[in-house]
Image (tube, helix red, strand yellow):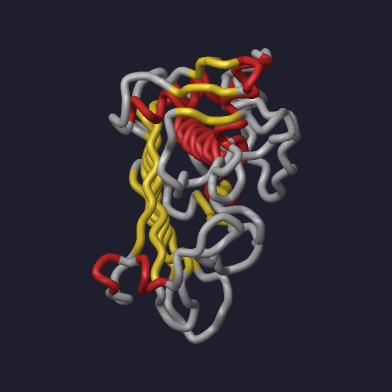
Amino acid sequence: MGPALMPLALSGAYCDLGNYADVVHNHDESSEISLSFAISLTDLQKASNDRGARFVEFSLPRPRQSGFYYGAWSETKLPKKGEVEARLTFSVDEPFGPSLSHFEIEVSGVGTANFVRTISGERREHWRVYTTMLPPKSLALRLGPRSFFPQIEIRRTSYGRSAPTVKHRIRVFVAATRLLFMFLNQCLSRSEFIGPFRTPPERRYAFGGFSSSRGGTSGEQAVDLLITEALLKPKGPRSLHAALSFWIRHLKLAESLDVKDIAKRLNLFVFV
């Protein structure tokens, strides 16, 4: 069934959050850290139909991501109303260390499943599942070595004994779960890191040329990327300017963002 643990990695190429005690609320290692995700079933179906487009088009291709394939498990159609919500909870229960300890998922009007990792002296897969509106022991949890999200699978023995209407409910539950994780995986893999903008922004910038293709770990090339896009006007599904403008408005930092060439021969641009 795969590895037993899903460790909580707090450090990577772009950030270092320290250890579990640095991140958890009030630095209390006996507390848990939870991540919740929710999306309406209608939006989830629309997102699955547009899974090939990037959020922002850059010149260099993104590296391929490995792990589970979360594509549509079957031709089962999702309900037009409701939502799917997942909650992943991490803890430092011995002897596992900071890792996934509790996983909950709910599909409106279909059912819920709570997967709980048991505490024992062995580092082996030992999960219990508690369901509502779904048959007991109808689902199983699978963890992948290179996947952030787990995968829900059907237990064929319980599924085979179920009535046709119950089988359909199980299929809808699994399909909604896999589409959710496919959507979240694509959101993460299609996102582009352009840096935290540690240095205070300036009003005028001198253009450094068309060599920039990434934002840089401190955002030092983000301005050149915006100017390059303004000059070349590339055709793509969504511009960097549109993506950045959305977050500036969403965070209530400004109403709009625009790049203007104020001195062409001097390569001088102003951001307004």
Q: Quadrant of residue 253?
A: top left
Residue 155 image offset from top left, x and y in percent: 57, 51
Foreground of the two, 185 or 143: 185
Q: Is residue 160 left or right of residue 211?
A: left
> In this rendering, is residue 49 above or below 203?
above
Residue 249 image offset from top left, x and y in percent: 34, 25
Question: Is any part of residue 40 visible from this angle?
Answer: yes
Question: Is any part of residue 185 visible from this angle?
Answer: no
Residue lying at the far left in this picture: please name it. Answer: 26
Q: How many marks?
A: 0
Q: Residue at x 46, y 30 (%)?
A: 165
Q: Is residue 27 left or right of residue 176?
A: left
Foreground of the two, 70 or 225: 225
> In this rendering, is residue 215 above or below 76?
below
- Quadrant showing the C terminus: top left
Foreground of the two, 139 or 248: 248
Q: Quadrant of residue 192?
A: top right
Q: Quadrant of residue 188?
A: top right
> In this rendering, is residue 115 above or below 4?
above
Residue 233 image offset from top left, x and y in percent: 65, 13
Residue 150 image offset from top left, x and y in percent: 55, 52
